[in-house]
Image (spheres, helix red, strand yellow):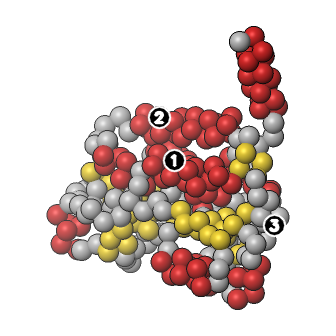
């Protein structure tokens, strides 16, 4: 028993001093949610590529940056050979990667709350890394901290409609985030009322919008500048424009964006 305990303590101490790193040194993350988590874990510099849409400032990552979605070129595909590529949910990309015999991991976060998105992404990431128990725990602590900050910022239920894009005088953006990410979570917690739809994103109807808004309804435009560092909240009456990197990326960066928004309004 004494030998067993000594061995167990040795393993714990060894693991405590181990450096969080990749099992496979050839990981590309085109998934915004995954890339943000890699950044939080101190693994950003080890990635062999990210997407141009990932909310990572240019001065924080100097490796290859690839165009997103289905616009990946044949040359890019050849660069992905012998690499593990993480990408956000997409039937088209999944088909392309299969046809090219590229090892790819699809990160599915549609219709999930921030907690669900982060946990599902971690489930896909964990097989690719090692000795990262502390870093995983830190990600979880940050999630809880951000969610607490958001909850504290909403002391009473508010009516809010979240649009994808900048709110301009002439016309509202055509798409609404109605049941996804932080919006879904706040609806579930009954902290907000919003556009009535079970779809994650929906094209709004003038009739439904009119029936579900008043002069006290906050209309919020979500603007994701990608790799730009810009962070602003601009208010004009009941219209608010948020510019924040990763505001449309499920998980930690979206929690950060909404915490920033509620702090400012």
Q: Could you tell me which secondary element the residue under label 1 belongs to?
A: helix
Mark toward the start of the polypeptide (2 vs 1): 1
Q: Is residue 184 above or below residue 202?
A: above
Can residue 212 be seen?
yes
Cα distance in 3D space between marks 2 and 1: 17 Å
Residue 255: x, y in percent? 51, 48
What residue does disc 2 label?
148
Residue 164, x across and y down, in percent:
44, 68
Q: Is residue 131 above or below residue 204?
A: above
Q: Residue at x 43, y 33 (%)?
A: 152
Determine crowd level at label 3: few under 14, some 14-19, many 20+ residues with C-alpha closer than 10 A.
some
> Which disc, if any, is residue 119?
1
What residue does disc 3 label? 63
Q: Residues within 10 Å of mark 2 (few under 14, many from 20)?
A: few
Task: Tell me, yes or no, whether the two marked residues, 2 and 1, touch with CB atoms within 8 Å.
Answer: no
Residue at 69% x, 87% y is 73
Q: Residue at x 48, y 62 (%)?
A: 108
Q: Position of residue 57 (x, y in %)?
A: 72, 60
Q: Which mark is residue 48?
A: none
């Amino acid at each position: 028993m004494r030998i067993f305990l000594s061995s167990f303590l040795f393993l714990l101490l060894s693991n405590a001093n181990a450096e969080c790193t990749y099992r496979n040194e050839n990981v590309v993350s085109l998934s915004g949610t995954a890339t943000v988590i890699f950044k939080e874990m101190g693994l950003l510099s080890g990635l062999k590529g990210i997407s141009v849409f990932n909310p990572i400032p240019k001065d924080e990552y100097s490796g290859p940056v690839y165009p997103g979605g289905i616009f990946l070129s044949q040359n890019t595909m050849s660069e992905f050979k012998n690499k593990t590529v993480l990408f956000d949910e997409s039937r088209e990309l999944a088909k392309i990667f299969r046809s090219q015999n590229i090892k790819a991991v699809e990160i599915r976060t549609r219709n999930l709350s921030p907690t669900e998105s982060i946990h599902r992404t971690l489930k896909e990431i964990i097989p690719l890394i090692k000795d990262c128990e502390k870093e995983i725990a830190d990600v979880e602590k940050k999630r809880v901290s951000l969610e607490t900050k958001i909850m504290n910022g909403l002391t009473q239920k508010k009516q809010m409609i979240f649009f994808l894009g900048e709110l301009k005088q002439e016309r509202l953006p055509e798409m609404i985030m109605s049941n996804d990410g932080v919006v879904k979570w706040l609806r579930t917690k009954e902290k907000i009322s919003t556009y009535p739809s079970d779809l994650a994103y929906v094209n709004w109807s003038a009739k439904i919008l009119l029936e579900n808004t008043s002069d006290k309804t906050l209309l919020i435009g979500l603007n994701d500048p990608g790799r730009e560092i810009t962070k602003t909240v601009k208010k004009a009456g009941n219209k608010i424009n948020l510019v924040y990197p990763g505001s449309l990326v499920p998980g930690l960066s979206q929690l950060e964006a909404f915490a920033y928004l509620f702090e400012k309004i």
